[in-house]
Image (cartoon, helix red, strand yellow):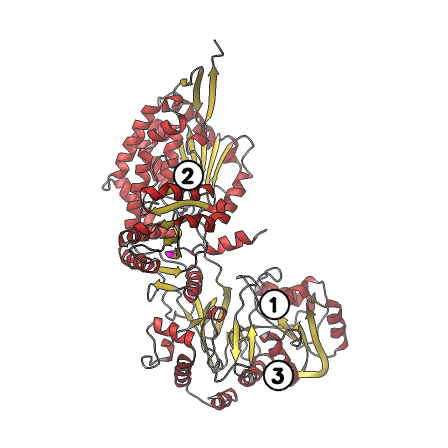
Amino acid sequence: MMVTALLSAQRALADRPVDEILRVLDRVAQRWLDHADPLRREAEAALAASTGLAPLMIRHGLDDMIRRMQGLGDLLDADLGTREALDGYCWRAPGVLSRTWGPGLLTCVFSGNVPGIPAFDMALGLALKSAVLVRPASEEPVFAGLFARSVAEEDAGLGRCLAVTRWGYDEAWPYERAGAVLVYGSDQTVAAIRRLVPAGVRFSGHGHKISFAVVCREACDEAAARRLAYDVAMYDQQGCVSPHMAFVERGGALSPEAFAGAVGAELRRLSAEMPRRRLTAEEAAALRGARDEAELTADAFWGSQGDLSWAVVHSETPAFLPSPLNRLLRTFAVDDAVSVAEVVAPYAPYLQTVAFAGSAERRESIAEALGRVGAARICPVGRVQEPGPLWRHDGRPTAGDLVRWTDIEEGRR
Amino acid sequence: MESELLRVFAGAPFSFGELALRIFARQYERCAPYRRFCDARGKRPETVEDWREIPHLPVTAFKHARIYSGSGEPTAFFQTSGTTAGPELRGRHWFANLDLYRACALPVFKRFVLPDMDRIPMLMLAMDPAANPHSSLSTYLRWQAEAFGTPGAGGWFVDESGLRVADLERALAAVAGPVALLGTAFAFVHLVDSGLGVRLPARSRIMETGGFKGKSREVGRAELYGLIRDALGPEVICINQYGMTEMSSNCYDQTLATGSARKGEPPWVAVRVLDPETLTEVPHGTPGIVAVTDLANLYSCAFLLTQDVGVMHADGFEIFGRAPGAEAKGCSISLDEFLSAVRQP
């Protein structure tokens, strides 16, 4: 019933020019960037209540998400050659005309670790002239619905192309008539849903990922430490782009150990400005155990006194060891930043974002080594949570993976 | 201090807080890893006035350092079994000698497991200490068999290949009157899974201890007791022992001691439930992390922070088990999930 209504609303959307849709979405974005807008304020309050994340963090995060959405036109141009291929045939190469089609129905399953994520994917679906069926996360059930409302208030036709509801992980109906399915979650969740998606339907699953930082000696200073601490603190380190560990090159203005201490000092400051969310007794007990273990085996340790707000665990021997999260960063000293690629190589399927601090000259050779072993994104330290609109999530074309093409070949003249 | 503790184990009155503070001062002085741990928390014997402020050493420390406060070199150690951290890293609990350990083991077992009779045939669902000399449980059970077992009855029914069900069945058939089956929880899972069906005589009892992880399927304690009563008879008395290699003393369900199925501890042990964030004591009924002060741990560290989540009540405490590893939300992954994922073949 819901799917039928979405597909019927989508038929009207298919006839609207892409630029017209993007203009509507831009008005929606403007509204979300107005911190005084009642809808925005309602969303901030609801997100703080459901996720437990610090209000300041939610404010920063929502701005990041909406700004990413504002670059949708650029993304379409980059992924599709030109956004006009969504409106009609365009020259792709001499003798080849191409036109692209959105999925018709895009079904999205979101996870609750980073609030605001649904904004971008819902807008992307609309820009691809498709209806979007959304299953929000149980921990964060509010935002997607508010976003859909904001679209509907701006343009009723577009609003009819969005539906937000929850269904079981064993239900197949949301995928049966979809053209593409987008899933965020644990590897187990992604695999379970993949089994329900009919063959021939595009499936894009974002499962478990691990991100880390590389700090080169020429950038090993207090400023980089402060930026890294922000990356760790945002979303209490629960984002798939949040760094678990930092590899810090010896020989810089700060020793790796001193750098680790500087990250700790900033994490302490940030825990006052944007406190970590409350943990359940089980979560806190697990974190306590992991932190004790880390402290007892570390070469140096900094941690909050009197609670588990934050910790930095330093080792002079590099290793690949993820964090128990909730603002616990592991730092490892390395002699040469390029050698980090060897340390992370065995974990290629998990690698995602690298928060990088270093000179532009060295960046490319380090990115060459890290890219070769699976890293998907190298970005400035302090900016992991603000991927640009052209971000290829997990190394795949974000819009390009959701469309199909029709080519006209003129034949040899 | 040994003779003082021996008197305490024998029932002499004493001041818990005063003795705890003296043991703290001694262990702070003698055990460098524990001293560093306390220093990092700004706690020293000169500044700690209430025993509840003494820092609790995480039991994981026994894996990474020699936690020893005896004089001279230790003469014995017990070793933890590999659990979730894998077999690679095992903790060791070092002892100057085992006299204190044995002296505190006997009266506690008597009080909680055998208050109503002098001797009972003991059938051990554990490995013979001769084959497993660094298992604290095997050693503990051997002492109990020597002190309270019916001579000539009973035996050890677990070896390298697992539970010897046929032998156990023959041994059970050979005894008249109540028996005690004592061993690890996972051995009891193997027992009930074996299909053994007997009806033990009245007043028979089982005592089980430890977790299941990696050794058998996981079963809740209530479910396990249901299965045990299905297999051995509905009247079987079931008692859980709460202890660990890093402790010298043990806590038990008080079923036979007071009638409460919640756990109690001997007078020289204090179990407290702490807020895992702040390590301050939580009110009765609120779950938290279990901290144990075991004054019998004279040669190592008496002040332990476990990884168990539990809850305190007026008539005893309950253990919910080891805190499961923190789980990340969504597409991030946390340490524990990562370790279990990369360990899969």
Q: Residue at x 46, y 80 (%)?
A: B69
Circle 1 is placed at which residue position?
B185
Sort mark 3 into few (<14), some (14-19) or many (20+) by Cα contacts within 10 Å: few
Parent chain of label 2: A
Q: Chain of mark 1?
A: B
- The range drawn in magenta is A324-329
Vertical comparison of A280 with A140: above or below: below
Point out residue A34 in the picture as x, y percentages from the top left corner.
24, 39
Mark 1 secondary-structure assignment: helix
Q: Which residue is mark 2?
A: A393
Tell me the amino acid under the disc marked 1: Ala
Q: For the point 48% across and 62% down, which residue is it?
A: B323
- Of all chains, the one bearing label 3 is B
Judged from this view, the residue extending furthest toward the top is A413
**In this rendering, which labeled residue sits more in front, label 1 or label 3?**
1
Q: Are marks 1 and 3 in contact (CB under 8 Å)?
A: no
Name the element at disc 2.
helix
